[in-house]
Amino acid sequence: MYRDTDISQALQKARGNISVAAKALGCSHSTIYRRLQENEVLQEVLDNEREAFIDFAESKLQDLIADGNLTACIFFLKTQARHRGYGGDRIRGPFDPKAEPYSRETFIDSLLKDPILDMKMGDSQPFDSLSITDADDEEE
């Protein structure tokens, strides 16, 4: 029988990954799942570890955006700024959700020329050397 403290420590070391925690303890993942259902404190440990890891990943994404990584910027806007019209295959204007959709190239061009983005990210030189291609373009 595994003690709650052992499971808790394994979950913390595994950053909330149940399979990794189970392997470290030498038990099956179903054993940990069962104990999580029986024990609210262990479930809270799991939830806290997963939230902390999400925070860590978000901070890395923010670092990439601040460094001028265009892919990270587009990913963030498509997933976190849908309410402003970003997302999907066609992107709408960031300040007018009723604006006519425009192409990916137009969107990227508007990012490169955005004075607010330049103020937040500093020099926009990381964008100057980017070569933007679509997967469809590469197949032709």
Image (cartoon, grey):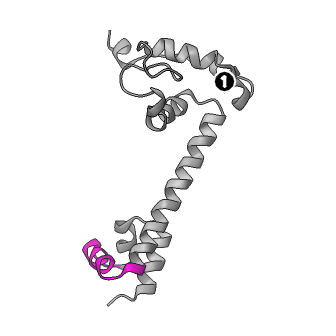
Classify the position of the C terminus by image quarter. Answer: top left
Query: x, y (%) of residue 98?
Result: 42, 18
Q: How many marks?
A: 1
Instruction: Please check the rendered image and state whether residue 96 is part of the magenta-colored stretch, yes or no.
Output: no
Residue at disc 1, secondary structure: helix
Q: Residue at (56%, 13%) from the top-left corner? A: 109
Residue type at the position of mark 1: Pro
Q: Residue furthest top?
A: 140
Res. 138 visible in picture: yes
Classify the position of the N terminus by image quarter. Answer: bottom left
Query: x, y (%) of residue 59?
Result: 59, 48
Res. 129 visible in picture: no
Q: Quadrant of residue 103?
A: top left
Query: x, y (%) of residue 25?
Result: 38, 79
Q: Residue at (34%, 79%) from the top-left corner? A: 26
Q: Which residue lies under the disc numbered 1?
A: 126
Q: Is residue 14 toward the left or the right of residue 73 in the image?
A: left
Q: Residue at (58%, 20%) from the top-left corner? A: 111
In the image, residue 83 sits, relative to residue 47, either above or below, namely above
Query: Which is the main secondary structure of the residues drawn in magenta?
Result: helix
Give whichever of 59, 117 is nearer the camera: 117
Q: Is residue 8 toward the left or the right of residue 67 in the image?
A: left
Instruction: Please check the rendered image and state whether residue 30 is part of the magenta-colored stretch, yes or no.
Output: yes
Give whichever of 104, 137 is nearer the camera: 104
Q: Quadrant of residue 118?
A: top right
Q: Which residues are magenta?
A: 26-41
Q: Residue at (48%, 78%) from the top-left corner? A: 9
Query: x, y (%) of residue 57?
Result: 53, 50
Crowd around label 1: few <14 · some 14–19 · many ≥20 (10 Å): few
